[in-house]
Amino acid sequence: MKSTLGSAALHPRWRHALGMPVRLIVMFACSAVADDAADSPIRIELFEQFASFTNSNHPDNRIGYRFHEHTPLTYGDVPSPAAAVGKRPATDAMLFSARPGVKTFHRRVTEDGWIPQDWTFHLAPVADGIEMLLVVKTSDVGLPEFYGVQQCFRLTGTANEAWRQKYARTAAFSEYDLWRDSPVGKGLVSLTQALHEGSLKLFPAGKETVGCRTPYGEVLDTRRSGGHLDTLEFIGAYRARMLWTADSGLIFRTSADKKWSTGLFWERTTHLSDHHPADCLHAIVNIGGIAPNSQRVLRGKIYWLAGSGEMLVQHWREDFPRLEGSGAEHNDLK
């Protein structure tokens, strides 16, 4: 079934609802996406800090997600209260949260090193994964131009510590399991990929934390380094070494037998990384540029489908057709 990630105005069953009261628009939205939840093989379980996903079509695999960790990357000024944030009406969050099967995770962020704010994640199971909406609300203090928060996509296998396996245990996508089971003397194999110059590119295999910038991240890093990107070789809490610039914020793995693929994408992603030994993929997402007492709404998606990495990329291109290539995301999502 075609993705419903686009705005209400783009969905064929919602077009004639424009101009109606919000209550009626929500009714149309629920009707339009009910089949997505019913057809989805994905099941979502929420914990205090994590979500965990299973797929009835891919048994004996569990994928994890951590909503909040470490401290943000920050740069720039906080917008004035009069500044506009984003282009989406507040009804987008209402439409999304009303969809059948949606799970909602809310967190008040107040830890040391963080500006107080509220996060609400809405997770909707669909045929090829989980569509996501994040609503960030500020209080009396806004967020500066760059406020990069790390999102953790956990692909732990059986080779990792037992406590991690409560949230993620997916031998199909675990690089550590693959390396453990490889014949002696055989080189390590990477499963992790991103888009680079229009093609799929593997991350190097190894325990070192490595990553790449997106075009949007390169713009921000160039500004905050005064034009000296070489001074920002290592990014984030795990000091991921930046290797190249990806075409977008999509990061994914394909199983060694090429039969299954899974991946993560968020709008306004600035950096991607492959972290070991936790067997996680990370996206740093810029939620910043929000005035005091304002909000920002971001779309994302977790993919989990039978097929190759090329097939996953095709699904992503259909879901987010304007967010690939140099500067596209930066220009579209100021």
Image (cartoon, helix red, strand yellow):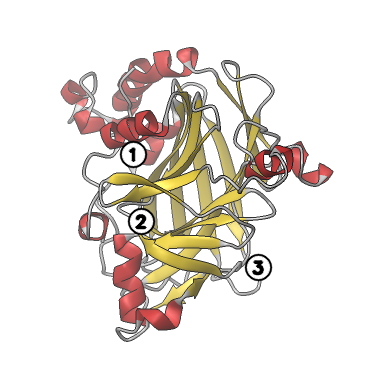
- Mark 2 or mark 1: whose residue is earlier in sequence: 1
Judge whether 310 appears above or below 109 on screen.
above
In the image, what residue occupies the spot 34% across and 36% down?
313
In the image, what residue occupies the spot 23% across and 53% down?
325
Is residue 210 something one can see in this rendering? yes
Residue 313 numbered mark, or none = none
Q: Which residue is mark 3?
A: 111
Location of the C terminus by quadrant is bottom left
**For the view shown, which residue lies furthest in the right direction?**
162
Q: Amino acid at mark 1?
A: Asp
Q: Amino acid at mark 2?
A: Arg
Is residue 7 something one can see in this rendering? no
Judge whether 315 appears above or below 75 on screen.
above
Q: Position of residue 36 (x, y in %)?
A: 42, 18
Secondary element at tag 1: helix
Q: Position of residue 132 (x, y in %)?
A: 45, 38
Quick one: label 2, few (<14), some, or many (20+) residues within 10 Å? many
Quick one: label 3, few (<14), some, or many (20+) residues within 10 Å? few
Query: Is the Cβ of the residue at disc 3 closer than 8 Å to that at disc 1?
Result: no
Q: CA distance from mark 2 to mark 1?
A: 18 Å
Q: In the shown orientation, is residue 23 left or right of residue 272? A: left
Secondary element at tag 2: loop
Residue 268 numbered mark, or none = 2
Between residues 4 and 249, which one lies in front from this camera angle?
249
Q: Which residue is mark 1?
A: 92
Q: CA distance from mark 3 to mark 1?
A: 28 Å
Between residues 170 and 89, which one lies in front from this camera angle?
170
Q: CA distance from mark 3 to mark 2?
A: 23 Å
**Mark 2 or 1: the one toward you:** 2
Q: Amino acid at mark 3?
A: Glu
